[in-house]
Amino acid sequence: MNKELFSANVKDKVFKIFAITCTGMALLTLLILIVDILIKGLSRINWSFFVNLPSRHPEQSGIYTALAGMVSLLFITLIIALPIGILSGIYLQEYGKRNKLAKFIEINISNLAGVPSVIYGILGLELFVRMAGFGNSILSGALTLALLIMPVIIVSTREAIKAVPDTMREAAFGLGATKLQTIWRVVLPASFGGILTGVILSISRAIGETAPLIVVGALAYVPFIPEGPMDQYTSLPIQIFNWTSRPQQGFIDNAAAGIIVLLVFTFLLNGIAVVLRNRWYRKTTA
């Protein structure tokens, strides 16, 4: 018995050391990459970098059109994905029947959240670029990204609504509220923090996507601001990808600076999501 206990303790300690070592190596690699990016890119972070157009001269090149394209792309993406994703989550959780078909749909929605983004790009190329005839417009990119983030929004909406206690619904029904009134005035306010967290996390995923945009025809060089959904566009990840393919060191430094800007956006969105999740958790457990 003592030998078995000793063996179990040794295995536990060995696994703990192994796990700590792997975690430390991963964090060290990430730290090295971030430090390398900061060293190369911080010198290029200035006002002109944000307001200049793309140029063949690295010291004169900026991310103005890429930022404008990224903001426009995310705006149209959210207009498309938010209502469909949230309403789908509400229907599946509150109205949908619990049968084999519903379970099949739920499993596939969860699986779609893990599909590689390039697959969505291929789907968007066939559906929106070719069949719908939208070409390589910002609308094609937004529809493709909407497909990409919609499963995340649906799953997060369902989980947030599922966390609302049934006693709140029963109390609303007891006061004479209808199903719709209960959802609108009780369930959604109580689950708003969780839904918003899922939406922000889905945005942080979409903001860094490059593969689906390349597939649907986003341009690497766009010297103008998109003025409508049918205009051609570029995005910050596409601009970074373009700079990294150039041989000049100046463009590599520009790419590092663009990565810093993208990381700031991503960390900011994830930080907001964490704050909202914690506030919502404290509110629901109070």
Image (cartoon, rainbow, N blue to C red):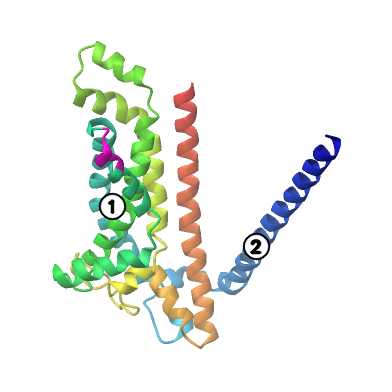
x%, y% of residue 121? 31, 67
Per the image, label 1 sits on a secondary structure element best described as helix
Q: Is residue 85 rendered to the left or right of residue 156?
A: left
Q: Residue 31 carries which label?
A: 2
Looking at the image, tell me whether mark 1 or mark 2 is earlier in sequence order: 2
Please say whether residue 102 is one of the residues in the magenta stretch.
yes
Q: Name the residue under label 1.
A: 78
Q: Is residue 28 left or right of residue 274?
A: right
**Could you say which is closer to the camera, residue 88 or residue 81?**
88
Give amino acid for label 1.
Leu
Label 1 – label 2 distance at C-alpha: 32 Å
For disc 1, the neighbor class at 10 Å (few under 14, some 14 to 19, many from 20) is many
Q: Quadrant of the N terminus?
A: top right
Left or right of 240, for residue 232 = left
Type of amino acid under label 2:
Leu
Q: Is residue 216 above or below residue 273?
A: below
Res 77 → quadrant: bottom left
Question: In this picture, which residue range is highlighted in magenta?
Answer: 98-103
Is 131 one of the magenta-colored residues?
no
Q: Is 215 placed above or below 101 here?
A: below
So how many labels did they put on this image? 2
Q: Is residue 241 above or below residue 281?
A: below
| Residue 262 image position (x, y, % from top left) | 46, 63
**Front residue of this view, candidates 183 and 254:** 183
SS class, disc 2: helix
